[in-house]
């Protein structure tokens, strides 16, 4: 998968929304496949117009607290790309770092959120809230 710094850099090189849109779809295509067994109601992100599934794995016992890794998928190409960006941003980070990172600020900085429909923007917010809730729960259990 593409690292978040590379994603941000690539967005700065793309001036047209159509190019950015295609890049988001490309990122979604690079997202590793999610097992059908993980496409459950419990893993579904509520508040998204498209179907979005998100799983997390918590590795405990690290010196900086629990580390979370995420996997996700969506039935919509553009949303799958948004999932890929969020995973690049948050996966492999400590719960503390996840809670200190505002993905919506990043999406604003790269000029992506302003071009999302209100439904997709709400869905993005729901995905971020879900990731942050997982991090908060992992930190509380540590």
Image (cartoon, helix red, strand yellow):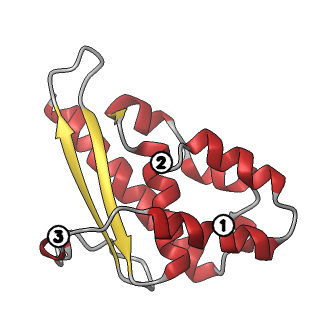
Q: Residues within 10 Å of mark 2 (few under 14, many from 20)?
A: many
- Left or right: 27 in relation to 7: left
Picture disc at residue 88: 2
Estimate the spatial distance between the alpha carbons at disc 2 and disc 1, rounded to whole Å.
14 Å
Q: Earlier in the sequence, mark 1 or mark 3?
A: 1
- Asked whether disc 3 touches disc 2, contact meaning CB atoms under 8 Å apart, the reply is no
Q: Would residue 119 be found to the left or right of residue 46 on screen?
A: right
Residue 122 against residue 70 in the figure, above or below: below
Cα distance, mark 3 to mark 2? 19 Å
Local SS, label 1 = helix
Circle on res. 58:
none
- Residue at image location 61% in from the left, 67% down from the top: 24
Residue at disc 2, secondary structure: helix
Badge 1 vs badge 3, beta-carbon distance below 8 Å? no
> Which residue matches tag 1?
23
Give me the residue at 39% from left, 84% from top: 75
Q: Is residue 108 visible?
A: yes
Name above or below for residue 106 compared with residue 142: below
Nearer to me, 106 or 125? 106
Horizontal and vertical percent position of residue 44: 27, 74
Q: Looking at the image, tell me whether mark 3 or mark 2 is earlier in sequence order.
A: 3
Q: Residues within 10 Å of mark 3 (few under 14, many from 20)?
A: some
Q: Position of residue 27 (x, y in %)?
A: 54, 63
- Under tag 3, what secondary structure? helix
Q: Which mark is residue 38?
A: 3
Q: Position of residue 67 (x, y in %)?
A: 27, 33
């Amino acid at each position: 998968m593409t690292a978040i710094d590379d994603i941000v850099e690539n967005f700065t090189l793309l001036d047209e929304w159509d190019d950015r849109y295609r890049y988001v779809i490309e990122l979604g295509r690079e997202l590793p496949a999610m097992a059908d067994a993980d496409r459950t109601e419990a893993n579904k992100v509520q508040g998204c117009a498209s179907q979005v599934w998100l799983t997390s794995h918590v590795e405990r016992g690290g010196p900086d607290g629990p580390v979370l890794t995420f996997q996700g998928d969506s039935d919509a190409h553009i949303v799958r790309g948004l999932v890929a960006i969020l995973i690049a941003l948050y996966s492999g980070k400590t719960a503390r770092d996840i809670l200190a990172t505002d993905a919506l600020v990043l999406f604003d900085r790269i000029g992506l959120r302003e071009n999302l429909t209100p439904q997709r923007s709400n869905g993005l917010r729901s995905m971020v809230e879900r990731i942050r809730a997982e991090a908060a729960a992992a930190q509380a259990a540590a």
